[in-house]
Structures are given as structure tokens and as C-alpha cells.
Amino acid sequence: MFEVRLLGPVEVWEGGRRVPLGGSRPLAVLASLVVHLGEVVSTERLVDLVWDEEAPATAGALVATHVSAVRRALARVDAAEVIRTRPPGYLTDLSPAQVDARRFEELLAAGRAAGRTEEAAGLLAEALGLWRGREALEGLGQSFARIEAARLAELRLVAEEESFALALELDRADAAIAPLLAHVAAHPLRERPRGQLMTALFRTGRVSDALRVFQEGRAVLRDELGIDPGPELRAVHQAVLRHDTGVLGTGRAAALPVPAPRNGPPHPAPSHLPPDIADFVGRAEEVGWATELLRGVGDTGRTAPPIGVISGRSGMGKTALAVHVGHRTAELFPDGRLFVDLRAADATPLEPADALARLLRAMGVDPDTLPSGVEELTNVYRTHIGHRRVLIVLDNAAGEAHVRPLLPPGPGSAVLVTSRRRLVALEGAVHLDLTVPDEAEALDLLRRVAGERRTGTEPERAAEIVTLCGRLPLAVRIAGARLAARPHWAPGRLAGRLRDERRRLNELSAGDLELRTSLELGYADLDQQERRALRRLALLDLPDFAAWIAAPLLDIGTEDAEEAVERLVDCHFIDVIGVDGTGLPRYRIHDLAREHARERCLSEESADDRTAAVRRLAGSWLDLARKAAARGPGGASRHFPEPAAVRPLDPETEAALLARPAAWFAAEQAGLLAAVTHCADHGLARTARDLAGALIASSAALYNQFDAWSRAHTAAMAAVRRSGDVEGEAWLLAGLGQLRYEQDRFEDSYAYFADALRLFEDRAPDGAAVALAGMGTARREQARYPEALELLEAALERYGGAADAGVRARVLYGIGYVHREQGRDGPARAALSGALDLYRAAADLHGEGLTLRSLALCDRAEGRYPEAERLLHEALRLFTGLHDTLGVMYTEQSLAKVELRTGRTEEAGRRLARCLAVARERQDRFGEALVLRTLGERSLAAGDTAGAREPLEHAAALWAELGLPLWRARTVWDLARVWSAEGDARGARAARAEALEVFRSLGGREAWERREDEQS
């Protein structure tokens, strides 16, 4: 099994073989991702984790390099996919079972939950056996590693001390003494193991040794901390002095303490708990938490009862958990186990006075003697329960005030409360937020209800059923019951019926179990404003969202919107799933709850209200997208016109969201795509078209996430065609042309822009100019320079002098590029200098960086290397500030060429290695081919013709796939040098002739530069 080991030196193992990662930085990158298992760790965060406060300027690019190095190492054992790219960073795709530290924590929790048993001892021994060294993450000095190592070290101490306690409970004092002596010597300030050692020594007859251990501990505490031993250790000391076997034991396994019988009422102790669920599965950690809480009942030093609040959404299994724990701990409560359903979601929930009366009747109080007022009832209740040991389960509490009168006054009894709300203001309570079980537990529940043979026939479909149920226990139980009731159904049939979101709630009904009823109860528990917020947030089926979106949806301020969302979090209708790259929490509504809330929205709100809410949200998204595109790298959204309507947020919220534009786009991309689909399906064609344009500016363009771009345009295209919006169709065709350009599919790009031009004619002059510029850019990349120049000049003329400075700058940049490639340096410089002035006037840092790089290429072609290097460093500074890794990569490739031509081959090699990692990470095939060719040139410059062959041949193959004959010809010219050095003079001459023919046919500058090389 593939495994990452952190409990000692950081290592990767596959089966019995260790996988070397090669270098401390790749090791630190992997360790930081594994420590944050299940989280997307942004590139910026990885820089902080791996370099602490000493990150180099190129650390962002180095992260990609180190990730690639780790993937290459893991690829040797077919595990390269363990690290996945998830904007804005990376994610480790490992189960907890594949990380020894996570297995250790799970075994520790299971051992503590198992009670004082042989099973618990075995679990803890297995957990401690995973450790391979004195410290976790040995060899890593970063702050994150030190913090994680300290956390795991503390858990190791807890595990060891729990293990010692079990040894004493199981009458193994002799075996415990030696490890306890070592443990106390290593951790002399920890009082619990010192007390355990004293107990073990006492039980084996070594009373004087036990007293000496106490005296040594007291001396150490006084010398080191200036304090005396705590009450627990002093109590053990007194017990040793008194030979108190009641406290220290006599060597027999301790039994669970059961209170002495009291003179109670003549009738049996009440037991009102509902029956335990026979097929209760999983929830080991939660059961352990509640059991440990209840075991604190009657502890010396306690003056109040243990109170646990189990909160969670409808169908999560709160009541089942409380009842299960009540049955498991029944021996702790000899005077009774009482259960009261407070019916929080009913139209008439149980009043405190009625609940008190029920509790008093259960304890044998004559109902005819009960007073009527809540205050008097509370006093009578406290009098009767004060001397008893009773477990009280209060189910479905509406709020803190609903519960307070029912709490017992002293430490002898305990309370478990279940509620859909968190009840955070309940004094003295500890809280458990019940979430969905993991997939294994949910599958186990499905198997138990439906039958092992039913689910075993189609395990993949069984897993799909669990996923479609959102792992919600009630939904899984209903699905299992449906399968059990229909033996002629294969699991695949039920999975197929559940796939349709619109009918899923109808399918999840079996007998008297109905998910919709459960969801209705939770919905009814909300107040009017909370219901409205939930309905609107569910309307667009967003996969996740930030709290600010509730402001336009509800037409309220952003502070009120955040409060509305957080109230729904407290009610467990919304989950907090993490923090996005802007630093804001991200929220999600459970799939089934979202579908129910969407149904309520459709039935309770008018179509006009729903449409207005969607348009307000779209307007805010579009305003933010427009501003983010202007501030961030890329700016591809400028291929779209101004949106029909925008709705600005307040300045403070806007500034916070757009402090990191690329991070905001990455966070909102999935929501934007969902909104495009919703608007396209609901007749909002113009809104769908505008939102699709916003997606172009998002990380879809910046991180080559082309699927979202394509899906948005496809959905919006269908909508505008249905509405007859020809101009909108033209803009979407232009967007698809830009998409194909970004995918290096230049002929397809040209065709889309040409289709857009036909629709734009006489309708939108600016749109026609965009299409012409796009066609010209595609031809420019294909090295069809005369045609490209004609199209770009036509676009510039169509724009006219009144066009936006940034728009004209982009066309001038393309014209300058063409002139440079044709060897016309004067016109190239003139066009590029004009573009630079316009970009600076428009404050477009990305365009400025591109143009500086292009001007540097002119200098490099003329042999003006210092000037070229200065311009490239200036461009590199701009791209680095914009967090534009592709801009950084292309600029570094250009710098590497300058370094090659000035004899700095080693420096160029290091720079190109970083570039290649970035290009491959970003799936930029053009960039990869460009860097491979430059690596080949580096090998040739270093006299290593053999080493040049592989990168040059790979580059030539990529150029051929991309349909770029000029670039392939340039690479073939370089390969000719390799073949000549290998003695293939005829092949080299043929290659140079082939390349020259391409140069001449395309009008590239090499047509005369290479001929002069041949003749010299």
C-alpha cells in the first residue's frame, strides 16, 4: 500500500520499498500538503510553509518545480496523481489510512472510545507502534513542521498515558513499571504518569519506592516551576500513606464504578429511552465523546451536571446517537434514564411547564400535587432530582431558554440535548456538531439496512447511492429500506432514479420514513427571515459561496448578509467548508437541503422576485469581475462588451474581495458557471451571456481551466439563439475564438472569430474590430505574417482613435510582433513603443509587461544584450507583482536566451528547469515546446550535441501537433547541428534546406539570417 510516514523522518513507501524524493524542498512541499490533508493549499501558502520568512522572489515558480519533482518521484511507483492541482494551489489525494499520523490519531480516538478493555489496549499499542523516531517530521526545520511535530508529540504522550492507565485497569502493574519509569524520567513535570507509576509500585508492594517517586516529583516541580504537586497527585500520595486500596486498587482489574443503591421510590427506576437502533453503525469518535462526557457524572470537584449538546441538520442522526449513548452508559444512572421530545419544529412545541410535569411524573411525583407555574415546577423538580443519578435526554430543543428550566441542579445527573441549532449560549455545556459520516460508515449503514448480498452485487452503484444521498444517515437508511423492500431492484436502478435532482426527494421515501418530512421540520424551525435567506441561497444551485452573495440576493447590506448566513450555519442548514484565497469563509448547503429549499423558493416566491434576485447577484458578480480583470493578470474579459447592468457592493467589501483578483476569480468560478447555466435555463439570455464573459476573465483563462469556459459559452449560446440575440451570439463566438486561441488551436480560433465577424458587420463596430484582431492574432501565431498584418491593421482602423487605449495597445502590440518576426526592426519598435505608451496610459501592468518583453526581443535580435536584460527584468518584476506565473515563465525563458548568448549556460539551465515545470504544470503546450527548444539550444551552446537531441526532437513534435511550421522549422534548423555532429551530413543539409524553404514561404526573418549563416 502507498503510504506517507510522518512519525519519524518523513518518508514515502510503496509496499516494502521506500521512494526517494530527492531534496529537502520537495520533501517539505509534500509534508506540508500531507499535514493539511484534504485541504487545497494555495501556492502562496505553500511558499510561506516551505520557506517561512526567507522566500526568494521566484518562490511561486519554485513551488511548481518542487511539486513536479515530487510527482516524478512518485511516478516511479505509479502514484504521481497523489498530488492534484486545485486552484489556487494543490491538494493531496490520500485517505487517512495512507498517512501514519492520521492512522495514529484514529487509533488513539478509537482506543479512548472503547473504554477500559483489552480491545482499547490493543488499539493504543497499535497506535504507538506506528512511531519510528523520537519526533515526528524529523529532518524538517520549517515552522509548520515544528508545530505539527509538537502537536503529534503531545498526542503521543496522551496515548502512552492512556496505555498506562489501561495496564493498571487490566491488572498489569508489573509490566507497566518499566515503561512508566522511562516515561517519568523523560517527562518529569507531567503529574499523571507519576501518579500512575506510584499506583503501579504500590500494587506490587513497593510502597517506599512509590513515596520516593512522589518526593522526587515534588522537588522537580518546586525547582523548575516553583509550585507544589496538584490535587490528583497529592491524593495518590495520601492514598499510598494510608494504604488505601479503595483508591489505588489491589491488582485486580477495576470495575466500572456503580453508585451504591439508594433508598428510592418503591416503583422501578424509570427508563424512558426509545429502543436502541439495532443496526447503529460507526460514529465511534462521537460515541466516545458523549460516553466520556457522561462518565464525568458525580466526579469529585464537580458542582454542576455534565451537559452535552448534539447539534446538526435534519436527518443527521442526532437522536439516534443520544439514545445509543444512553443505552451504553445506563449503568451510570441507576435512578433512571428520562427522554423528553421537546418538538421544536412543531407548530406547538412542548412548553417548559409541560416538560417539567412529565419529568416529575416519571420520578413518581403525584400529578395532583404539582403546581401550575414554571417557577414552582422548577423548584419541585430540582428538589426531587437533586439526590438522584439520572440521565436526561432532551430531544429537539428549540433554544437555550427551552432547556434551562429542565437542567438538574447538581453533579449527580447528566443531560444530553439534541437540537438543530448550536445552543452556544447554554452555560456549562460542551458541544458536538454532528456532520455526515464518512463514505465507509455510510456504505456500512446501507449494507446493514438493504442486506449485504443486495449491495455486494453492484458495489460501484451502492457507493453512488450513498453519494447521491449526500451520506445523510436518514437518506441512506431510506435508500436501504427501498432496496430491501424491492428485491427485484438492482442498486443501479435506484441510483439511476436518484440521479435526477428534481425527483430525488420524492424517491427518498419508504414506509413512515420520508426525507422531505424531516427537511420540512427543520425548515419550519426557522424564522421568516432565515427561511427567505435559505430559499434565495439555494435558488441557483451554487456548489459553494461566500457570505457577501446574500446581500444582492436579499437586497440587504453585506454585514446583514453575513449575519444571515451565519445564523443558518448555527441552524446547520449551511456548512463552512473552508477559507478561499481572499481569506473569506466558503459556505455550502447540503445537496438534499438545497433541493428542498429550492422547491420552497419556487412555491413561496413569485417569478418576478426570483428573477430580480438573480439579476442583482449577477450585477454584483459582473461589477466585481470587470474590476478584478482590470487589476489582475490576463484581462481576457476585454473581448466582451460592457455588461447590460452592474450592481456595485459597498467600497469596504469590494476592496477586501479584490485585494487579490486572481484569488477572487478562482473562488467564484464554480458559482459563475452555475449562474450561467441557471440564467440560460430560465430565459435570462443577456445575463447568461454577460456572466460567460466574466468567466473568460477568471481563472478559467489564467489557469487553463478550459472546461468551465467551454460549458459556460455553450449554455449561453443556446440561450441567445433561442432569444434571437444575434449580436450576443457574435460575442459568444468571439469568446469561443479566444478559448481556442488559449488552447493553441489557432485554425479553430480563426474560424470562430471569422464567424463572429460575419454576425458583427453593421451591428457592432467594436465587435467587428475584436473579431478582426482575433483573426489577425491567430494568423500571427501561425506565422502567416502578411495576412496577420492586414487583419490587425484593419482592426486598428475599425477601432478608430476614440477606442479605449488598452484596446488599441493590444492591436499595436500584435502589429509590432509581426514586424519583429519579419525582421523589420524599425516598424516593430515604433508599433511596440506606441503600445507601451498606451498600456501605461491605461494602467495595464500585464500589457506593459508583455510589451517590455517584446521590445527586449528586438534588442536581443540586434545583439543589444544589456538593454534586453534590463527590459526583461523590468517585465519580470511586473509579472511577479501580478502573480502571473505564465508571464514570469515566458519572461524567464527570454532571459535564459540572453544568458545563453552571453555565455552563462549554467544560470540559463537553472532558469529553464523552472520554466519547464511551470509550462507542464499549466498544460501550456506552446510554452513547453518553446522551453524544450531553448534547453536544446543550451546543450548546443555547452557543446553537448548529444544532450540537445531529446529536447529538440520533443519540441519539434509539439510544434507539429500545434500546426506551427515556422517554430518547427526553427527547431529543425537546430537539430541539423545535432545530426551534423553525429556524422549525418546529408540529413543535416536536407533539414536546413527544408527549414529555409519554410522561412522563405512564411516571410520570417530567418529567410535571410539563416541564408547568411549558410554562406558564411
Image: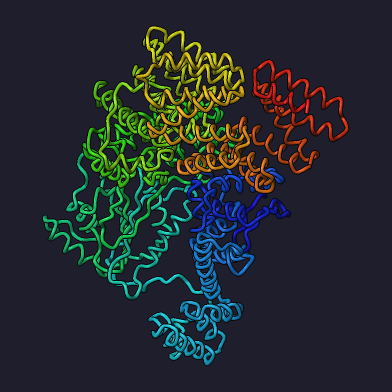
Q: Position of residue 80 (x, y in %)?
A: 65, 43
Depicted 103 relative to depicted 565: above or below: below
Q: Is residue 601 left or right of residue 481?
A: left
Q: Position of residue 495 (x, y in %)?
A: 51, 29
Can residue 127 be seen by looking at this rendering? Answer: yes
Quarter of the image that includes the C terminus: top right
Depicted 769 relative to depicted 130: above or below: above
Q: Position of residue 671 (x, y in %)?
A: 40, 32
| Quadrant in which residue 631 is drawn | top left
Q: Give the number of marks.
A: 0
Depicted 768 relative to depicted 953: above or below: above
Pick whichever, 979 or 412, lies toward us: 979
| Quadrant in which residue 173 is drawn | bottom right
Q: Is residue 294 left or right of residue 185?
A: left
Q: Which residue is drawn at 31% across and 54% down?
A: 417
Q: Which residue is drawn at 55% across and 89% down?
A: 206
Pick whichever, 38 or 663, lies toward us: 663
Residue sitting farthest toward the right: 983
Q: Where is residue 727 in the image (x, y as percent from the top left)?
A: 39, 12
Can residue 484 be seen by looking at this rendering? Answer: no
Pick whichever, 382 or 587, lies toward us: 587
How does the figure colour the protein chain or chains? Answer: rainbow
